[in-house]
Amino acid sequence: MGAPNLHLWHPFTHQGADPAPVHIRRAEGVFLETRDGRRILDAISSWWVNLHGHAHPAIAAAIAGQAARLEHVLFAGFSHEPAEELASRLGKIVPAPLQHIFFSDDGSTAVEVALKLAVQFWRNRGRPEKCRIVALENAYHGDTAGAMSVSDDSPFTAAFESLRVPILRTHSAYCAHCPVGLTRATCLIECLESLERLLAGRGHEIAAVIVEPLLQGAGGMIVHPEEFLSGIRRLTAAHDVLLIADEVLTGFGRTGRMFACERAGVVPDLMCVAKGLTGGFLSLAATITTDRVHDAFTGADHSRAFFHGHSYTANPIACAAANANLQIFDSEPVFDRIAAIERVHAARLPALAAHPGVADVRYIGTISAIELKVPDAGYLSSLRPRLYEFFLNRGVLLRPLGNVVYVLPPYVITAGQLNFVYDVIEDSLALLPS
């Protein structure tokens, strides 16, 4: 017989060293309730997925209703109404050239699909030499092998170098630590020049450039100028290279527009969405692409087919949750709530920027970040666990990215609740080394 109880192995956790997990028994709105009755304000949307607050009744009802009708059916050779409705709803909000949708399970798998589509696209077009991928410094795209390959070197990837595919790397527009030594006030986005040189010299072997548009998430909540993204689109178009926009974090209003690409007037060749797609209730992802990409996979030759799939592709219950989520954008003042969050960020960050222990502050839409001055900057900064414990003890869930504290709340947070989060962050600066 096996052991009476299997031991839970939690993600991104140092087994035996990190504090014991907090047991959550229920959640509603912006609050999590612990087993002992404490309330914790979820200021990071439970890893960036929750949009409209926990336990939103419309999404919960949609899930229950769909589960009673059709819980799952394989999507190879079959279809169902929730997936078709979701494709229709997404078609109304993504940029018009994006016409074809491939469902998968989560952000990492949406990226894997995009990478494989990009490489096979050129193979099907008779250009198999165009198989290299370009990714940015500070990138994070997920933890499966392909997604991990296009992510930058970090503690997340260090143990798996033998599994990673070689990637071409180019500058990120990290204005607080400019890769070309300039300042944002006077620069002309010269950090684009490394990509321009790379495409000019090796465009004949490059299949795609992948970016997190305007905001690099796990790399430190790095906000890019809009001109940087539009410049990437201009260069990829000029050199006939596909552009993959990883909107897994930035999609569904996080940056103040439905998709971050809209802020720069950019339409990618492939767009990856996940996290907020179901409002934070269930795992579902999609990779959406253009006629040009899709049409390279059609025809009688079986070798042109995209032989990729997942057991739970287009799960009906997850699709029903996503449809209910998107309906909330139509029936509730979601973008008014988003604008209200942005106003609080704009009001509170200047005081934090003036603190001697703060290296940089930045925000875009509903997301803000405070980069702290420490001698051991990076994800493994010794300050991170101390901050995390401090925030939990004050009743706030904030999970710093090393020395970067970020705020990424559900859209239903009130101004008072968000100002309380900032008050706690201000108090936490007493933990900084003197």
Image: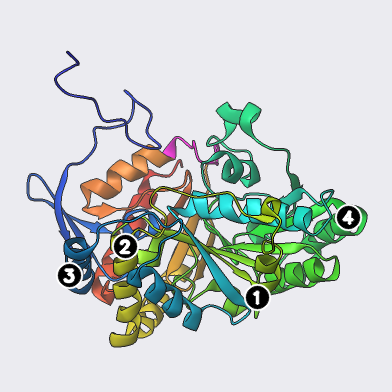
The answer to whether residue 52 of the structure is visible from this angle is: yes
Q: Nearer the viewer, residue 318 or 388?
A: 318
Which residue is at the far top? 1
Q: Residues within 10 Å of mark 1 (few under 14, many from 20)?
A: many
Q: Which residues are magenta?
A: 375-383
As measured in the structure, the alpha-carbon distance from the residue carrying label 2 to the one carrying label 1 is 29 Å
Where's residue 23, x and y in %? 17, 42
The answer to whether 22 appears left or right of 377 in the picture is left
Which comes sooner in the sequence, label 2 or label 1?
1
The answer to whether 172 appears left or right of 103 in the picture is right
Which comes sooner in the sequence, label 4 or label 3?
3
Residue 270 occupies quadrant: bottom right
Three-letter code for the amino acid on which mark 3 is drawn = Ala
Q: Which mark is residue 267?
A: 1
Which residue is at the far front? 300
Residue 228 in magenta? Answer: no
Secondary structure that dominates the magenta span: loop
Q: Which residue lies at the image location 60% right of the left edge and 43% below the top edge? A: 146
**Disc 2 or disc 3, which is closer to the eye?**
2
Residue pointed to by mark 4? 204
Three-letter code for the amino acid on which mark 1 is drawn = Val
* Circles 2 and 3 in contact, beta carbons < 8 Å: no
Q: Residues within 10 Å of mark 3 (few under 14, many from 20)?
A: some
Where's residue 25, x and y in %? 13, 49
Q: Which mark is residue 61?
A: 3
Q: Nearer the viewer, residue 34 or 2?
A: 2
Residue pointed to by mark 2? 316
Where's residue 141, x and y in %? 56, 50
- Up/down of 123 relative to 228, above or below: above
As measured in the structure, the alpha-carbon distance from the residue carrying label 4 to the one carrying label 2 is 41 Å
Which comes sooner in the sequence, label 1 or label 3?
3
